[in-house]
Amino acid sequence: MEFIVTLVIFLITYAIIVSEKINRSVIVMVGGLLIVALGILSWDKAIREYVDWNTIFLLIGMMITVSIAGRSGMFEYVGVKLAKVCKGKPLAIAMAWGVLTAFVSMFLDNVTAILLLAPITLSITHKLKISPYPFLLIQVFLSNIGGTATIVGDPPNIMISQQVGFGFVEFAKVMLPLVLIIIVVSLVICRIMFKKNLSVFTQEAIDEVMKMDEKEFIKDRKLMNISIVVIIVLIAGFIFGEHIGISPALLSILTAFTMLLFASLKSEEIIEAAYTSVDWTSIFFFMGLFILTGALEEVGVLKIIATFIIDITNGDLTKAYTAIMWFSAVLSGFIDNIPFVSTMIPVLKDVVPEYGANADVLWYALAAGACLGGNLTILGASANVIAVGIAKKDGIQISYLDFLKKGFFITIFSIVISYIYLYIYFLL
């Protein structure tokens, strides 16, 4: 009976998440707490064993750090400076910002990258008197691609690395070369898709951009200098921390409170703003998902799925790799990749030992499929939803179908390249 009740609650919760009729963090917490209230999973076990506090603290730490750094104006400064380096030409700006977004997404996660850079995009496109539509879509696509490169770049990677134990360098050594290839290919595709949109501009508009003074965007130079040093130290910590036993979660929260310490010497207002900048919607969404998937594991649903995967692939690693890569990409395109990956992690933990040597390819297939598949539709990744929301506030409507038309080509090329690359890396 517990098996059926758990499965029904999970499927209903999933369906409501996809429908977007109710706030996703609310419905997923209601689903998780209902599981506990019915006695299917004890509260103590849910909190101690299934909620991944490493992921939670990593996210909170990054949100606080980026919030404080953003108050210095450093991100606006970089965006305007880059636009002027591109001589104010829309096509060049769009490509350059795409690369910048990808790079930022590698270290500050793709959602943060969009929240930071999209407002600057709107400012520059207003100066150029052209639609921000192609700029925002290019940024979204590149944010999801860039976030695939590291364990902190995209929530699915954060979840996978915390559960499996991948270090920052270990993960990046596999994924970064792949992501760099995909970035180049995606820029070519975006150039073809958006060339007409980005070719209509006037010299007068370009002159407006070139007159902008990037220094005017610096709100607090001292805070900016401190932020730059702290973020560099944080990135270095991600790279070398695994060798001295410091986890990304500890580094993230330590960096956040180091920034808060500096901020406390300047103004209590900065601290209050930093605390309110934490996206509690996402935090509670993760917590609810951890409880829900923990219940699925507890009643044996995930064991059945794991056995099914082994049976249909006949224990063949190549077949399992192919199934997980494409299954992840397609499903993550139509439902948010976070709940999908949350469900698949405990399944793979059961499956991977059955495939012997090189079975880590299955984890990388899940990461690549989930992160890159997120470019398929608006619902595929949180960064997509945020960017579309920002565009709507500016009067730009990006429809589900329009996003799908553009995202389809980026996604297909990305997944094909990933499939070939990881196959060669692990299985040849």
Image: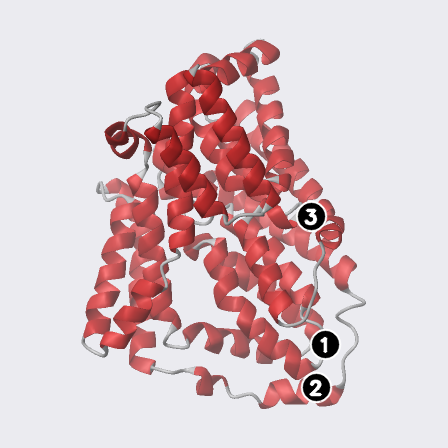
> Which label sits in the foreground, 1 or 2?
1
Secondary structure beneath label 3: helix
**What residue did someone put label 1 on?**
130
Q: Is residue 351 visible?
A: no
Q: Identify the secondary structure beneath mark 2.
A: helix
Image quadrant for the C terminus? top right
Question: Who comes first in sequence, dot 3 or dot 1?
Answer: 1
Residue found at x 48% / y 76%: 76
Image height of 54 relative to 128, above or below: above
- Whichever of callouts 1 and 2 sits on the residue coming sooner in the sequence is 1
| Chain-order first, disc 2 or disc 3 | 2
Farthest front residue in view: 38
In whole angstroms, how far apart are the C-alphas of marks 1 and 2? 9 Å
Q: Which residue is mark 3?
A: 410
Can residue 342 be seen here? The reply is yes
Q: Amino acid at mark 2?
A: Ala
Relative image position of residue 80 (x, y in whole percent): 54, 78
Question: Which residue is under mark 2?
Answer: 205
Q: Amino acid at mark 3?
A: Ile
